[in-house]
Image (cartoon, rainbow, N blue to C red):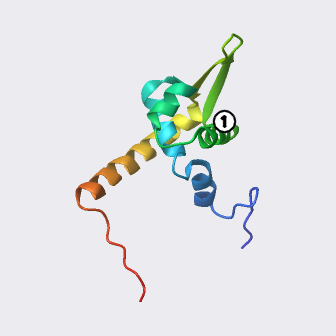
């Protein structure tokens, strides 16, 4: 059986998690889906534990992957708005499911991880 590899990905799950994996991507997509449009400063306040450098990098990755739209207004000071794209919106039900799952696990004291001894 021959597998077609797309840009180094053997598994569709690898591809999907590369797009939304990490500490911040899911949270940013969730907040944009809830708010509609957010400016950089608003995102910085909403995702309070992210550094400016990491926020900029994460937003660029999400834009490159087509999950968000970035709109720049030609004015001084510069105004930039971010909005979730149609493709990004398709991920929201899955992000919500993970959010609900996380809330349940936190409420139940979390999952005990077994360590190999």
Q: Is residue 75 left or right of residue 113?
A: right
x, y percent for residue 25 = 54, 44
Image quadrant holding the N terminus, namely: bottom right
Q: Is residue 98 above or below residue 41?
A: below
Q: What crowding class fits label 1: few (fewer than 14 Cα within 10 Å), some (14-19), or many (20 or more)?
A: some
Image quadrant holding the C terminus, namely: bottom left
Q: Is residue 90 left or right of residue 57?
A: left
Residue sitting at the far top:
75
x, y percent for residue 85 = 58, 30
Q: Is residue 108 left or right of residue 48?
A: left
Residue at horizontal 63 percent and vertical 28 percent from the top: 69
Residue sitting at the far left:
108
Residue sitting at the far bottom:
117
Residue at horizontal 58 percent and vertical 36 percent from the top: 87
x, y percent for residue 72 = 68, 19
Residue at horizontal 62 percent and vertical 42 percent from the top: 58
> Of helix, strand and loop, which one carries label 1?
helix
Q: Is residue 115 above or below residue 40?
A: below
x, y percent for residue 112 = 32, 71
Q: Is residue 75 above or below residue 99?
A: above
Residue at horizontal 67 percent and vertical 17 percent from the top: 78
State the count of labels.
1
Q: Is residue 16 above or below residue 52?
A: below
Q: Nearer the viewer, residue 69 or 15?
A: 69
Q: Quadrant of residue 68?
A: top right
Q: Is residue 66 left or right of residue 92?
A: right
Residue position for label 1: 63
Q: Nearer the viewer, residue 34 or 40?
A: 40
């Amino acid at each position: 059986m021959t597998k077609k590899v797309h840009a180094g990905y053997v598994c569709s799950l690898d591809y999907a998690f590369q797009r939304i994996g990490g500490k911040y991507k899911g949270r940013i997509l969730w907040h944009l889906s809830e708010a509609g449009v957010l400016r950089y400063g608003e995102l910085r306040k909403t995702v309070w534990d992210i550094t400016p450098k990491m926020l900029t990098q994460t937003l660029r990755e999400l834009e490159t992957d087509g999950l968000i739209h970035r709109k720049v207004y030609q004015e001084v000071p510069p105004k930039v708005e971010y909005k979730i794209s149609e493709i990004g919106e398709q991920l929201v039900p899955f992000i919500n499911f993970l959010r609900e799952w996380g809330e349940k696990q936190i409420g139940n004291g979390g999952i005990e991880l077994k360590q190999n001894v």
